[in-house]
């Protein structure tokens, strides 16, 4: 990602997130990571989607109760650290970083979370819930409970392998399982 930016390959702002979520690419323009600057989170001062609060003394209010603007990046890292030993929920490697890219972020480094990109076919919202193995659903639920996650939805669960279609009979339209879903920040 660093080499890609040094060669002039700009980060790509994700259109679907409420905060600044950028795809970072290597020199072949392949997405290798996701960067979420802390100061561009929902209701943070530099949110690129104009998702900011008017100054009224309530600067501690974030997009969800108990989460202040600018704290999401640290929470991304915490999710990875809680999952990394057994990797049951599939949270990709995530770390706090400083990114400097004059064209996109100005002359000062941006502080935020960097997460390895997970190549995927679609999100869970494109699939039926019965296609996911129960053990994987439970692993993600346990992590969400430990984290008090308030942002679980099918759009931030990624499907890495296509469901095989069955053609033997009318009741067998889709296979009964898919590969374990992985987190992508989407949630960021």
Image (cartoon, rainbow, N blue to C red):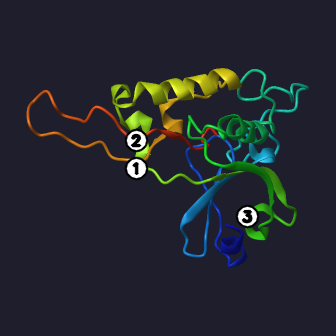
Look at mark 3 in the image and give the residue it sits on: 104
- Dividing the picture into quadrants, the one containing residue 90 is top right
Measured in 3D between alpha carbons, the distance from the residue under mark 2 to the one under mark 3, in whole angstroms, is: 35 Å
Decide: is 81 above or below 147: below
Foreground residue, 86 or 42?
Answer: 86
| Coordinates of residue 166 in the picture (x, y in percent) | 16, 39
Look at mark 2 in the image and give the residue it sits on: 179
Q: Do the residues labelled 1 and 3 touch (CB within 8 Å)?
A: no
- Foreground mark, 2 or 3, reads 2
Look at mark 1 in the image and give the residue it sits on: 121
Measured in 3D between alpha carbons, the distance from the residue under mark 1 to the one under mark 2, in whole angstroms, is: 11 Å
Identified at 8% across, 32% down, the residue is 169
Identified at 68% across, 79% down, the residue is 7
Question: Crowding at label 2, few (<14), some or many (≥20) Cα neighbours within 10 Å?
Answer: some
Question: Crowding at label 1, few (<14), some or many (≥20) Cα neighbours within 10 Å?
Answer: few
- Dividing the picture into quadrants, the one containing residue 102 is bottom right
- Foreground mark, 1 or 3, reads 1
């Amino acid at each position: 990602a660093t080499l890609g930016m040094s060669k002039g390959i700009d980060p790509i702002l994700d259109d679907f997130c409420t905060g600044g979520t950028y795809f970072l690419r290597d020199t072949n323009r392949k997405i290798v990571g996701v960067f979420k600057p802390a100061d561009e989170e929902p209701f943070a001062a530099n949110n690129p989607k104009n998702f900011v609060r008017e100054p009224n003394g309530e600067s501690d209010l974030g997009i969800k109760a108990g989460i202040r603007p600018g704290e999401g990046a640290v929470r991304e890292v915490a999710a990875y650290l809680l999952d990394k030993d057994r990797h049951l929920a599939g949270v990709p490697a995530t770390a706090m970083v400083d990114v400097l890219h004059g064209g996109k972020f100005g002359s000062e480094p941006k502080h935020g979370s960097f997460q390895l990109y997970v190549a995927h076919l679609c999100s869970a919202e494109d699939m039926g819930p019965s296609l996911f193995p129960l053990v994987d659903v439970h692993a993600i639920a346990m992590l969400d409970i430990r984290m008090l996650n308030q942002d679980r939805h099918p759009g931030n669960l990624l499907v890495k392998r296509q469901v095989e279609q069955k053609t033997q009979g009318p009741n067998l339209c889709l296979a009964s399982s898919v590969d374990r879903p992985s987190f992508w920040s989407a949630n960021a």
